[in-house]
Amino acid sequence: MWSESKNSIGSRGSEGGAIISDDEHSLGARVTLEKGGDIAPFSITVGVYCSFFHTTYMGSLSEGEAIFKSMKSDIDEYLNYPQKEESNWVENFVNRY
């Protein structure tokens, strides 16, 4: 289950921008959307605890919000069905995003 981490909204994210969305999954993942970072107008940083860390970049807020939502859905499915092979899932996730 996802929950919003409201304490981090507005603070500086790992890409140097202001955090505008920051959600954490109860089974061990976090997805953070930033604006105004060092590399691109918007970025999403993903961490699936004890598994992988990935950052992707986009040019608009609408694109960022759509990808943020899609990433959360993919991660939720993966965490709720752990019998999937981790290495293939991570590779597919990174290639998609």
Image (cartoon, rainbow, N blue to C red):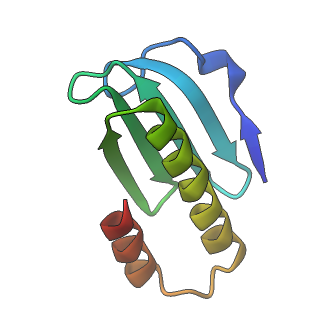
Residue 80, image quadrant: bottom right
Asked if 77 appears above or below 3 in the picture, the reply is: below
On screen, residue 54 versus residue 76, left or right, reads left
The residue drawn where x is 63% and y is 79% is 82
User: Residue 40: where, in percent of width, then height?
Assistant: 25, 30
Quarter of the image for the N terminus: give it: bottom right
Q: Quadrant of the C terminus?
A: bottom left
Residue at position x 49%, y 50% in the image: 67
- Where in the figure is residue 57, as x and y percent of width and height? 31, 41
Please determine whether, in this image, residue 32 is positioned above or below residue 79: above
Q: Is residue 91 above or below residue 11?
A: below
Percent from the top left, x then y, of residue 7? 67, 17
Comparing 6 with 35, the one in front is 35
Q: Residue furthest top?
A: 10
Residue 71 image-quadrant placement = bottom right
On the rendered structure, is 93 left or right of 7?
A: left
Residue found at x 67% / y 63%: 76
Question: Seen from this angle, which residue lies furthest left?
Answer: 39
Camera-nearest residue between 28 and 65: 65
In this rendering, the count of numbered labels is 0
Q: Out of 54 and 61, give the one closest to the viewer.
A: 61
Residue 3: % across, % down? 76, 40
Horizontally, is 89 left or right of 70 in the view?
left
In the rendered view, tell whether residue 65 sits above or below residue 69.
above
Q: Residue at x 61, y 73 (%)?
A: 78
